[in-house]
Image (cartoon, coloured by chain):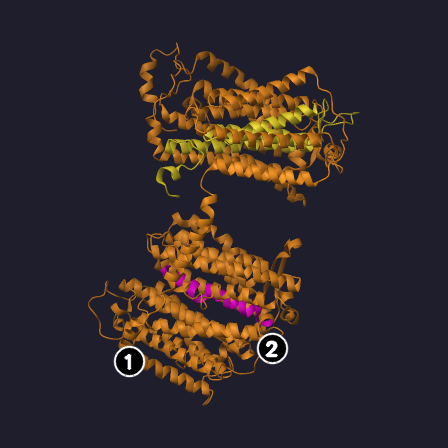
């Protein structure tokens, strides 16, 4: 299967669970499982190539100029991680099906889970580091949604925020580091970067790039000092913890360190930073984990500790260390995911995860006991289980690692950490499963159905198989290690064995296990000492940092941003003015190249009207209705100006838009106060006048300047004029530009228009379903209503001219390609015709005769335009390539058929729907306000006997 | 004629700016509408002024008005209707919800603390 498909499947599949939600929980989990399984199988189809040592590549140039290409690569390292992500993902989905309760929205959960899965697969298969960063951020976002899935829990929300903040900041630093890296190499393709070890390490920017990238990795993989977010993320549902926080997301940082290992590792900086951070995290995590009482918190800190262990192994920079790291990633994913799932089972059965309230579960939950104990013993490093093997390799590696010139430092600390590591595993088994059966569990613990215990059981089988027969995993781990090492080192020939002889690592292992047992024995006094020790609480520190950042931001922002819109406008206008003035003053002003055209008395009269109307608006704007009349005059004069200056299409558009705008404003004014009170001081009005005059003078000067000068280059209009007929098949160049040359722009614009109309509809709905509704219903009109709001004259007139207007609209639409007109104008004309019916005959009467909802009209318009554009794909042409031909059907004259006309139809419908939906929404507000609606078109109708009797039945509320 | 158009743009801008700086929503919306006219005419005028030569191709005619700014302005007019409608709706919703049609945040004066 193509790599693109493997990455795309989870994203596409994420649409399904939400759709399947109503089909039931099993269907919902079923589609999710199927999608994951398809991706998993797709991945496996690439197994032969990977085993042969090949690198599968899939590439599409996305933005080549930026170096951002959609390049995917599958080598054995990527395969290994993708296998973990998809394989454990399948188990988690099966587990989550049984874990989530009926109250949880399963569709939502699985949507997030698939989004996360896709993003993770994307990270491990990316060959382009910019693409990788995109997926990296996507995992942060989707994990935020997953951690905060239980929105009602404050811990969930806080944990999600904390995780997003920490990993998001890490992501930002990683972007910087990756960009530096790309600049050094001159390519953003990983395959190229990995070939340039010497170049990168010799560069002066190597250290900053390294530090920035490592910050991102450490934040993601919860390395010290960023380790604190992971335990707080445990507020997530257990499947999320098992998936994200043991097997996948926290390994993303590890993955990247392994990915970058060939070019970044091997330097003293890498060694010191990575090994130290890993070592500290490992020891710290293990110690804290021992004293945690919440099962999941214990597991979380143990994950932190194990991630530290892997980081430390990668930090040593040796081939053996890298191999041990890969092996431990595999082992840790198996036993830790199984442990998390077991914790979820215990929580499910006993209704508590507090170790102090558990104990004796070995008899009550035998299946869980076996699964959890095997996994925990593996984690403790007990022989014949897989954890022992990689832990032994780790200890062997530390024995050879010298940090800060002190040979004993690393092995001693590693052994110390291992003691605690073994101790918390023993505590988990001992305090949860052993001991007497109690009678005060919050609920009676019992083994769950197989749906819950099978997934961890499958993982535990792996734990045992690898532990007993390490040679099974050896070839695969070595294969993965080869691609980690790249050209930087050769694969070590050490074999995975249970018995290595009496090597130092064995003694260290023995010390760890014995030490762990002793710690368990002295746990109670040790806990007392621990509780008395002053410890910094990470969450408090984090909260303080966030709080002080917020305070600082507020201190900077609030004085500038105080919510006074008029102030921002004034500041913004002044800034634009100053910037424009600076450009003007520093630029050169050439001599005029055009001669001013003479103006006759008619033009001057038109100008006078425009100026008078504008001045009137400024002076009389407190009378709102009057200013609305005046702005109508302004619009009319502008339309006439367009006619005069050879723009008939613009004039028609402006004129029709003017009509609907005025109607809209009138509808709004119905609810708003009719006058504007005097509030601003004289000083303020003087200031505003000064700003306005300055802005006016500036635009005047700019317009006057360029009106008298020709364009510097050759305007692209020449091309459009020359090709409108040849290429577009139309004589009206403006229309050809709209539907053909710049059809994609127009397509975007009708979509925007549709969205605006839907937004208005949504706002209306929100208003009508909120407290505003009561206010509207109780509202008294502030002006006397007309006695006859739907007079017969008007009803008759509008109904008579309706077909005429429709014919005009049709005519305007058809001739648009060659004469002034087209979809925009026709849409506006037809909507005016419909609005007239609303005005004359009333809302109820008109709505009752509406066959298609306006939303549908908008959607149909956008779809028709879109499908017309897509039609050109079938002929191998780019989107929206137009074509036309001439047809002659006897006895008619030859006429033209153009795909552009179909596109224009889409424009027509979208405009019609958008205008009507906007106006209809406004009038719905009005309708609720005073419910004197009648389903009759006329209030007074001689053919009806009694108007009064009809009214109570029909004046019903609603649409 | 150029002077007339340029001054009309300037006057529309000045009027629009003054109204946009007012304190209530309705004059601000009217101001934005005036600015829309100014901007549309400004863009349109960037094709320079041509009288009596609409960009409708005809045999034997070689002089046409610049069609590109016209096409851009045509869609701008329609979009500006949509945007005006949204702004009107938002201001109407704000007024109906709070019985207050100020454009400036009033919370500072009433509660004394920034929200």
The total number of labels drawn is 2
Pointers 2 and 1 within a single chain: yes
Farthest front residue? Answer: A683
Can you identify the residue that label 2 sits on?
A489
Q: Is residue A629 left or right of residue A336?
A: right
The residue where tag 1 is placed is A521
Query: Judging from the image, what is the letter of the chain drawn in orange?
Result: A
From the image, state the color of chain B: yellow
Give me the disc on residue A781. none
Quadrant (top left/top right/bottom left/bottom right) for the C terminus of chain A: top left
Q: Nearer the viewer, residue A721 or A448?
A: A721
Q: Is residue B47 visible?
A: no
Q: Nearer the viewer, mark 2 or mark 1?
A: 1
Between A154 and A495, the one nearer to me in the picture? A154
Residue A808: percent from left, percent from top: 59, 20
In the rendered image, residue A766, in percent from the top left (x then y), is placed at 40, 36
Q: Mark 2 falls on what kind of element?
A: loop
Residue segment shown in magenta = A234-262
At 47% from the left edge and 21% from the top edge, which residue is drawn?
A: A625
Q: Chain of mark 2?
A: A
Q: Is residue A191 above or below residue A921?
A: below
Say if the magenta span includes residue A933: no
Task: Report in which chain the residue with disc 1 lies.
Answer: A
Percent x, y of residue A339:
37, 69
What's the CA distance linking mark 2 and mark 1? 45 Å
* Helix, strand or loop for the magenta stretch, by majority: helix
Residue sitting at x 62%, y 40%: A579
């Amino acid at each position: 299967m193509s790599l693109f498909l493997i990455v795309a499947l989870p994203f596409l599949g994420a649409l399904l669970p939400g759709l399947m939600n109503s089909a039931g929980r099993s269907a919902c989990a079923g589609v999710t499982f199927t999608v994951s399984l398809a991706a998993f199988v797709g991945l496996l189809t690439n197994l032969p190539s990977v085993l042969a040592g090949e690198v599968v590549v899939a590439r599409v140039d996305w933005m080549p100029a930026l170096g951002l290409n959609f390049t995917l690569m599958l080598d054995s390292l990527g395969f290994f991680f993708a296998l973990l992500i998809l394989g454990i993902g399948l188990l988690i989905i099966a587990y989550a099906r049984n874990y989530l309760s009926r109250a949880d929205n399963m569709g939502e959960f699985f949507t997030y889970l698939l989004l996360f899965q896709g993003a993770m697969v994307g990270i491990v298969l990316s060959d382009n580091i910019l693409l990788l960063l995109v997926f990296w951020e996507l995992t942060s976002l989707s994990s935020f949604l997953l951690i905060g899935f239980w929105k009602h829990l404050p811990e969930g929300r806080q944990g999600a925020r904390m995780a997003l903040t920490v990993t998001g900041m890490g992501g930002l630093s990683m972007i910087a580091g990756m960009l530096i890296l790309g600049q050094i190499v001159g390519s953003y393709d990983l395959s190229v970067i990995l070939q340039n070890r010497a170049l990168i390490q010799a560069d002066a920017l190597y250290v900053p790039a390294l530090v920035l990238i490592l910050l991102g990795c450490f934040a993601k993989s919860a390395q010290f000092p960023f380790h604190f977010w992971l335990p707080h993320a445990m507020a997530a549902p257990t499947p999320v913890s098992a998936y994200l926080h043991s097997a996948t997301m926290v390994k993303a940082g590890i993955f990247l360190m392994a990915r970058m290992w060939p070019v970044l590792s091997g330097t003293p900086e890498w060694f010191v930073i990575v090994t130290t951070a890993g070592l500290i995290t490992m020891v710290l995590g293990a110690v804290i984990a021992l004293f945690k009482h919440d099962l999941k918190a214990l597991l979380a800190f143990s994950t932190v500790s194990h991630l530290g262990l892997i980081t430390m192994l990668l930090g040593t920079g040796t081939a053996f260390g890298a191999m041990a790291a890969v092996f431990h990633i595999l082992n840790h994913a198996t036993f830790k995911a199984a442990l998390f799932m077991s914790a979820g089972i215990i929580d499910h059965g006993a209704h508590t995860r507090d170790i102090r309230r558990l104990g004796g579960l070995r008899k009550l939950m035998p299946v869980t006991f076996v699964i959890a104990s095997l996994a925990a013993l593996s984690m403790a490093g007990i022989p014949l289980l897989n954890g022992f093997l990689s832990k032994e390799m780790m200890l062997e590696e530390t024995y050879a690692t010298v940090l800060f010139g002190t040979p004993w430092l690393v092995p001693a600390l590693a052994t110390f950490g291992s003691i605690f590591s073994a101790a918390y595993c023993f505590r988990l088994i001992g305090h949860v499963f052993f001991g007497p059966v109690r009678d005060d569990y919050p609920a009676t613990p019992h083994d769950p159905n197989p749906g819950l215990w099978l997934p961890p059981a499958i993982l535990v089988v792996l734990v045992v198989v690898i532990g007993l027969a390490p040679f099974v995993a050896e070839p695969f781990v070595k294969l993965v290690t080869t691609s980690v090492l790249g050209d930087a080192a050769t694969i070590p020939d050490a074999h995975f064995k249970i018995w290595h002889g009496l090597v130092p690592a064995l003694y260290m292992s023995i010390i760890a296990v014995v030490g762990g047992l002793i710690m368990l024995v002295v746990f109670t006094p040790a806990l007392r000492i621990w509780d008395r020790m002053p410890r910094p609480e990470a969450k408090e520190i984090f909260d303080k940092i966030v709080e002080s950042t917020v305070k600082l931001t507020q201190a900077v922002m609030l004085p500038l941003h105080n919510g006074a819109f008029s102030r921002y406008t004034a500041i913004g206008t002044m800034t634009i003015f100053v910037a424009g003035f600076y450009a003007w003053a520093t630029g050169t002003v050439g001599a005029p190249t055009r001669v001013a055209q003479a103006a006759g008395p008619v033009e001057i009269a038109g100008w006078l009207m425009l100026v008078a109307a504008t001045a009137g608006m400024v002076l009389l704007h407190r009378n709102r209705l009057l200013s609305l009349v005046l702005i109508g005059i302004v619009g009319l004069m502008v339309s006439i100006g367009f006619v005069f200056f050879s723009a008939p299409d613009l004039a028609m558009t402006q004129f029709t838009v003017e009509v609907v705008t005025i109607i809209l404003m009138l509808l709004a004014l119905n609810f708003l106060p009719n006058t504007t009170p005097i509030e601003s001081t004289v000083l303020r009005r003087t200031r505003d006048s000064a700003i306005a005059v300055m802005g006016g003078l500036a635009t005047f000067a700019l317009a006057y300047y360029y009106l008298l000068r020709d364009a510097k280059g050759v305007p692209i209009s020449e091309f459009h004029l020359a090709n409108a007929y040849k290429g577009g098949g139309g004589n009206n160049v403006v229309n050809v530009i709209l539907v053909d040359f710049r059809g994609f722009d127009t397509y975007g614009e009708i979509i925007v228009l549709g969205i605006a109309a839907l937004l208005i509809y949504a706002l209306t709905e929100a208003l009508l379903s909120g407290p505003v509704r009561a206010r509207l219903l109780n509202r008294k009109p502030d002006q006397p209503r007309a006695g006859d709001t739907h007079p017969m004259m008007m009803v008759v007139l509008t109904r008579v001219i309706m077909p005429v207007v429709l014919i005009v609209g049709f005519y305007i639409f058809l001739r648009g390609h060659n004469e002034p007109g087209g979809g925009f104008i026709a849409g506006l004309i037809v909507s005016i015709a419909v609005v007239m019916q609303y005005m004359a005959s009333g809302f109820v009467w008109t709505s009752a005769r509406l066959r298609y909802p306006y939303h549908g009209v908008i959607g149909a318009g956008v779809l028709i335009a879109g499908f017309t554009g897509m039609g050109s794909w079938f002929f191998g042409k780019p989107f929206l390539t137009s074509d036309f031909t001439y047809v002659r059907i006897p006895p008619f004259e030859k006429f033209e058929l153009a795909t552009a006309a179909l596109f224009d139809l889409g424009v027509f419908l979208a405009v019609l729907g958008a205008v009507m939906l906007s106006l209809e929404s406004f009038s719905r507000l009005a309708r609720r306000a005073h419910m004197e609606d009648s389903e009759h078109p006329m209030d007074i109708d001689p053919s009806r006997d009694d108007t009064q009797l009809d009214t109570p039945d029909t004046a019903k509320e609603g649409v | 004629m150029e002077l007339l158009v340029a001054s009309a743009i300037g006057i529309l801008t000045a009027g629009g700016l003054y109204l946009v700086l007012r304190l209530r929503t309705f004059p601000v919306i009217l101001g934005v509408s005036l600015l829309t006219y100014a901007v549309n005419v400004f863009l349109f005028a960037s094709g320079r002024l041509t009288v009596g030569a609409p960009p409708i191709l005809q045999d034997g005619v070689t002089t046409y008005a610049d069609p590109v700014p016209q096409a851009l302005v045509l869609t701008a007019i329609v979009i500006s209707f949509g945007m005006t409608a949204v702004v009107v709706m938002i201001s109407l919703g704000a007024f109906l919800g709070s019985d207050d049609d100020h454009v400036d945040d009033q919370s500072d004066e009433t509660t004394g603390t920034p929200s």
